[in-house]
Image (cartoon, rainbow, N blue to C red):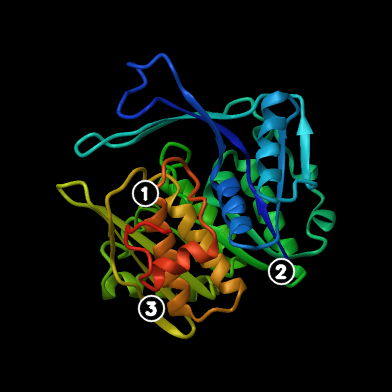
Amino acid sequence: MKVLCLGEPVLRLSPRPPLMLHQTDQLSMAFAGSEVTVAKSLALQGDDVALASVVSSNTLGERSLMELRRFGVDVSRVQRADCRLGVYYVERGGTVRPDRVLYDRDGTAMRDVGRDDFDWDGLLNGVGSFYFSGVVASITSTLGDVVEDALVASKGRGIRTFCDLNFRRGMITPAAARELWGRLLPYVDVVCGSDEDYVGIWEREGFEGDGDQCAAAADRLMTANGIQSLAMNRRDVDAGGLLSVRGMLLSEKGLFRSRSRDVAPMEQSGCGDAFSASIVHGLLNRWDAQHTLDYAVAHAAYKATVEGELSWADEATIERIVTGDARGSIIR
């Protein structure tokens, strides 16, 4: 059955590393957006995926849809509008200088949508799973309502629902995020996110670290909202710049933890999307919880070695990491 992702394609502009925005006179162009990246990743892993959105009818909007078609993502549910395509700027950091992201999303089609602009009876026809993230739900308060409508319609049809918290402090305050997720989580079956997402939204609920206290906080959140599975990824960078990725998955079958995977990172943007896409992929394919988590962590670590938002990894590539067959050697 098809996975329907709700999100907004946006244009990513970035200077060539290690240049900063105020140093460069050239910007590289790519099309991304959290939910769009997840849709592409799911398609690369072999899943049947569609996108629901409202996109600019200009050349950039068409180009963003061409990119999705290239990966096999169904864009027949995407509406067009006379507006601009959203833009964000990514400035890569290093050691003591963090990555920086600047958003320019005013005046885009998704900012102007109303609840009546989405016909969920039609959009959910033939869909088995629905995916969204906190990015699209936080663009405007109306889009939060749109997401809630989609979730209610999905649950009424027995459609499985997935989300990535994707907390962006530049888009929504912690208090507003708690109110938003208080409305949405009772309709969500599977929740994904980074440790920073959980801590950022539920600031004093015990999500710090990844020990027993964090697992207990996750269990309380699941119980309060009827969540079936909760996944968390954690990424830490040491003084030498080495990135460590690990994860936790909690479900009715128990608590599962992954091993830590260490990589020399190229870019961390998109690691969370890779993790979430692989949690969705594993659960859709009815893998056991431990393998699903190990696969998702391996994918997140792999993504950190790839420039851009997308890992470009298929299932076989990720499985080679899980089984230990990919250790930086040359594949001949």
Q: Nearer the viewer, mark 3 or mark 2?
A: 3
Q: Position of residue 61 (x, y in %)?
A: 69, 30
Residue 287 at x, y percent in the picture: 54, 79
Which mark sits nearer the N-terminus, 3 or 2?
2
- Check the image and report above or below for 127 versus 285: above
Instruction: Give the Cα distance between marks 1 and 2.
Output: 34 Å
What residue type is disc 1 on? Answer: Thr
| Identity, as a three-letter code, of the amino acid under mark 3 | Phe
**Do the residues under discs 3 and 2 have CB atoms within 8 angstroms?**
no
Left of 154 or right of it: where is 7?
A: left
Q: Which mark is residue 305?
A: 1
User: Quick one: which residue is furthest to the front in this view?
Assistant: 332
Instruction: Provide the secondary structure element on which disc 1 rests.
Output: loop
Residue depicted at x 37% and y 50%: 304
Q: Is residue 165 visible from the viewing direction of this image?
A: no
Q: Which mark is residue 256?
A: 3
Residue drawn at 66 percent across, 24 percent down:
84
Q: Which residue is mark 2?
A: 159
